[in-house]
Image: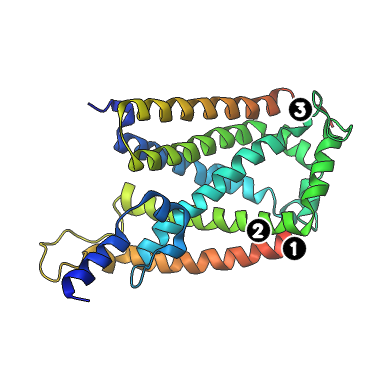
Amino acid sequence: MIEMENKASNIQIWQYITAILLIFLLGYHLLQRVPWLFNVSTFDQTLTSAFVYNQYKEAGWALLLLAWVALFHGLNGVRGMLFELHQGKTYNTIINVLFWLVFIVFAAIAALTIVKLPAY
Amino acid sequence: MSDDEKFRSLEMENRQGFWKASLNPWLIRAKNNPERVAFVLHRVTGFIIIAFLLAHILETDSPVWSQYAPINGLSGWAAWTYIMGIESAWWARLGEWIVAGAVLFHALNGFRLLLTEFFGLGIGKPVEPKPPYEAPTLNAPQRTWLYIEFVVALVLWAFSAFLIFG
């Protein structure tokens, strides 16, 4: 019997929930790269150390939330596709463990960016 | 080719296959089936985005990790500036533009999927199936949204080229 957390329907519902969050979080992040909104003239000027540092200081929590939600959405999407490919007790366990492992490692790296970011 | 063979061939072309449907959209014939095109592109762009996202998280953490593993002797924000210098090369910008296109299509198509699949909007009312068994959803507003989505994604992708290469 397939365990509850492996059900495709649950995986898909999480995709929808994270997608709704991503509309706002990613929308905000993309706007951060539009130069005219910040009185600079080029895309490259939105990527300078000072500019990026200020954006982290202003709303680093939103960027961290974006990283976590986007990671979950992306990895969960791959997990769903891998379950479409094949199903089995060992296989499912391996996919689920890999999913959480990659998620936790990259979520921790994203958190470190906020916590340990050096001053500009 | 007999009708039976034709049907089987068509059925096989549209059968969901992991590699075929996920990684190589050029292998799939999708005549008169824009939903299929959107489905395949959603997966292809999803793979592009997840690959970029993992690299992007490492890249944005570079001011932190470079303090322990300097790049060319550079650490902290100097390492960030060095990486941005590499990313200003034409090939890196081209990559950014491809990612931008993937994000724009994936986001717009995802929004359509949210409306139709999650909220049940734009798919019409259920009807009794009658020959030739055309799905009523294919004539519902969601298909119009799909065409609008393709156009908007292309326009925004062109705009992103102006931003990235301009």
Inspect the image, locate mark 2, and give the three-letter code of the amino acid beneath it: Trp
Relative vertical location of residue A44 with respect to residue B134 in this rendering, above or below:
above
Q: Position of residue B50 (x, y in %)?
A: 55, 43
Q: What's the coloring here?
A: rainbow
Q: Which residue is mark 3?
A: B64
Residue under pointer 1: B165
Residue B110 appears anywhere in the view: no
In the rendered structure, which amino acid carries the disc numbered 3? Val
The reply to whether the C-beta atoms of the residues labelled 2 and 1 are less than 8 Å apart is yes
- In the rendering, at what x and y percent does residue B162 appear? 70, 65
Tell me what residue is drawn at x 47 percent, y 39 percent.
A73
Q: Left or right: where does residue A50 sit relative to residue B149?
A: right
- Residue under label 2: B97
Q: Residue at x 61, y 24 (%)?
A: A108
- The answer for which chain carries disc 1 is B
Residue shown at 32% from the left, 65% from the top: B141
Chain containing mark 2: B
* Element on which disc 3 rests: helix
Q: CA distance from mark 2 to mark 1?
A: 9 Å
